[in-house]
Image (tube, rainbow, N blue to C red):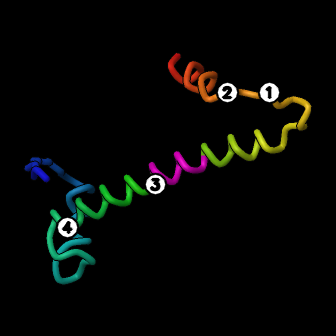
Amino acid sequence: MAKTTLTVRLSGALSEFVSANVGEDGSYENVSEYIRDLIRRDKERDQAASFDRLKAELVHAFAAPEDTYQPLSAADVIKRNQR
């Protein structure tokens, strides 16, 4: 996996907040560790939101009366998803 170096400039309250979370008094040893954790948590939140949207669609679909179901072939599903 390729590594990317990013430069981020923070000032004021944001800089103070990061500093408070890094070092002897913070939860992280260095800023890079802190940023990686933030990105991982953001990625997990995004994946959870995608799962919740899918789950809501499935709950809605399974709540529909059976007489509203339409039979579909695999070709129908593929064609519908190519749009």
Mark 2 belongs to which amino acid?
Answer: Ser
Residue where numbered disc 4 is placed: 33
Cα distance between the residues tagged 4 and 2:
49 Å
Residue where numbered disc 3 is placed: 45
Q: Earlier in the sequence, mark 4 or mark 1?
A: 4
Residue 38: where, in percent of width, then height? 31, 59
Cα distance between the residues tagged 2 and 3:
34 Å
Mark 3 belongs to which amino acid?
Answer: Arg
The residue carrying pointer 2 sits among few (fewer than 14), some (14 to 19) or many (20 or more) residues within 10 Å by Cα, namely: few
Please name whichever residue, 26 or 59, is drawn nearer the observer in this view of the structure.
Answer: 59
Q: Is residue 76 left or right of residue 83?
A: right
Give the label, 4 or 1, closer to the camera: 1
Q: Which mark is residue 70?
A: 1
For residue 24, above or below residue 40: below
Residue 27: where, in percent of width, then height? 27, 77
Cα distance between the residues tagged 2 and 1:
10 Å
Mark 4 belongs to which amino acid?
Answer: Glu
Task: Determine the residue positioned at 85% across, 38% down.
Answer: 64
Q: Earlier in the sequence, mark 2 or mark 3?
A: 3
Please name whichever residue, 43 or 76, is drawn nearer the observer in this view of the structure.
Answer: 76
